[in-house]
Every structure is written in structure tokens, then in C-alpha cells.
Image (cartoon, helix red, strand yellow):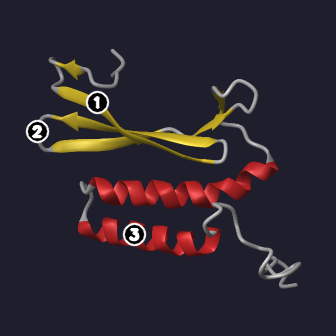
Amino acid sequence: MALQTGVIDEVNETRVKTIETVGAGRWIVPIEKVHFGREKFLYRMELLRMSSISGGPLGRRFVPEDVLDLPKLVQVLAATLVADGCLSQELKDDLDCLAATLDIVVGPMGRLEQEDLGPRSWPRPDGR
């Protein structure tokens, strides 16, 4: 039996709740928390790319331009998980640091801010 959002499975004592859906660009991630009894849970997330035509989920495949939105998506996802508060302190600290660092890198527009650095400012694998 598949678990559904907001449904309680009496036999397995599980409950699934969508805590948030975050996104950046065409990417969205529904975040679900699956509760097992009173004190055990796990997070379940799925990375989806939205269609620009229909606005509905297109799938998991993406084009090179979509890569520019991934750092912002990770930043928002990390901040959301920290705010939920059900992680170990060490993981919350790591995710909080990641979110803060990515916030600096992606800037307020949500995409990598390269124009201030000039052309070819990003380090290349070959060192040029």
C-alpha cells in the first residue's frame, strides 16, 4: 500500500505529511515527513522539473540552463530542513552553513552572480 499525504496507516502506524514544497527556477522539491509511531520519522523528497508550457511536472531530466538554478534550490532546501527542526544539531549546523554560503554565492536573484566577476572568472578544471 502506497503512503499518501495526510493519511494514517493504522497497521504500520505510519503517517505522511507534506511539510513544504520548495523550488527554484523550474525545479520543485516536495518535502514529506514520514512518521513511524511517535518518535521515528524520515524525510522523503523528490526532485521534479516543471514544464514551461503546462506548468505541470515534466520529469527529472533537465537541460544545461537548469543547472544554474540548482544551487538556489539546494540553498532553499537546506534552509527549510533546518527550520523544520527535527534533525541532529550537527546536521542542522552543516545545512545552515551550506544555506548561508549558497545564499552569498547565488545572490538575491537566485542564479549564480557572474557578471560582477567578469568573463572567465569561474575557476576551470584545467586551471585557466
Which residue has dot 2 on it? 38
* Image quadrant containing the N terminus: top left
Residue 117 x, y percent position in the rendering: 79, 82
Earlier-in-chain disc, 2 versus 1:
1
Q: Kindly indicate whether the residue at mark 1 contacts the one at mark 2 (C-beta within 8 angstroms).
A: no
The three-letter code of the residue at mark 1 reads Val
Position of the C terminus by quadrant? bottom right
Percent across and percent down for residue 40 are 18, 43
Of residues 67 and 23, the one nearer the viewer is: 23
- At mark 2, the secondary structure is loop
Q: Is residue 81 left or right of residue 127?
A: left
Q: Residue at x 65, y 62 (%)?
A: 109
Left/right of residue 55 with respect to residue 99 in the rendered view: right
Classify mark 3: helix, strand or loop: helix
Tell whether 58 sits left or right of 95: right
In the displayed structure, does residue 68 sit left or right of residue 3? right
Q: Residue at x 19, y 35 (%)?
A: 36
Kindly report the distance in space between the C-alpha atoms of the residues bearing marks 2 and 3.
26 Å
Q: Which mark is residue 16?
A: 1
Q: Earlier in the sequence, mark 2 or mark 3?
A: 2
Which amino acid, by three-letter code, is at mark 2?
Answer: Arg
Which residue appears at 67% of the width and 54% of the height? 69
Above or below 9: residue 21: below
